[in-house]
Image (cartoon, helix red, strand yellow):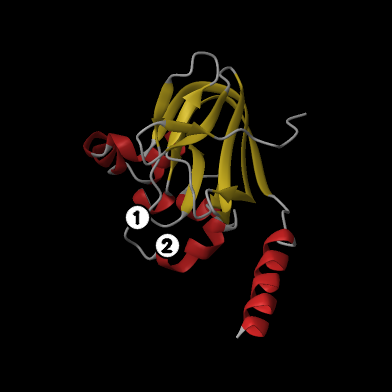
Amino acid sequence: MKHLIIPLFSLIVLSICCMPTKMKTQKMHFENADIIFVDPCYFAKDDGVWEEYCEDFAQNKNLDKLGCEQSICISVGDVSPDVLVNENDGSVLGSICTDSYVLGCFKLEDVLEYNPEYAEDMEKYPDSFTVIKGFTGDVVFETKKERYYDEVLPITTITGIGTIRFHSGFTDDDGSIKLQLSQCNMD
């Protein structure tokens, strides 16, 4: 039995130590735009677009099918952000929810032009998205494997550098906000 435990333990340690750490990064520049961070399944029309293109959206492809030319999407990791935090004063800008494990940043006007009925959902479910008004700058999504408590998991981070500096965080089990700082080079 000892001979089985040692190789299994070695295999686990080897797989954690050799786990790829390559980041998946998406970056988009916005000019004086009201931007919304939201799971695109929330505003996709009931016309089959979500079912047909969901996997494409997760890979930042075919976003024009959602009526959004200037946007980015990413498939979020197991530990996805649930708040955006203003770096200047530490205030929470808003919440994010991802039921489909896809998160996007879109121009709000494009989303509402594509699906005007989503405005009603925004009023009903204000904790499912964050809007930042008049943003000029870059938004970066990145996912990489990081240690989270006793596991190594893919974790998605959001960073904004522009008229407002912000980054993502998530609410820990005790209700405190754990900030996520990006490792990317914004230049």
Per the image, the residue denoted by label 2 is 49
Please name the amino acid that badge 1 sits on. Answer: Lys
Query: Is residue 70 visible to the viewer in this orientation of the structure?
Result: no
Quarter assignment of residue 72: top right
Which residue is denoted by mark 1 in the rendering? 45
Measured from the top left, where is residue 115 in percent x and y?
35, 45
Q: Is residue 18 left or right of residue 133?
A: right
Q: The C terminus appears in which quarter of the rendering?
A: top right
- Asked if 77 appears above or below 52 in the picture, the reply is above
The number of numbered badges drawn on the structure is: 2
Q: Residue at x 24, y 34 (%)?
A: 123
Question: What residue type is disc 2 on?
Answer: Val
What is the residue that sits farthest to the top in this orientation? Answer: 89
Q: Which of 3 and 122 is in front in this view?
A: 3
Q: Position of residue 181 (x, y in %)?
A: 61, 33
Give 108 or 125, whichever is nearer the viewer: 125
Q: Residue furthest front?
A: 2
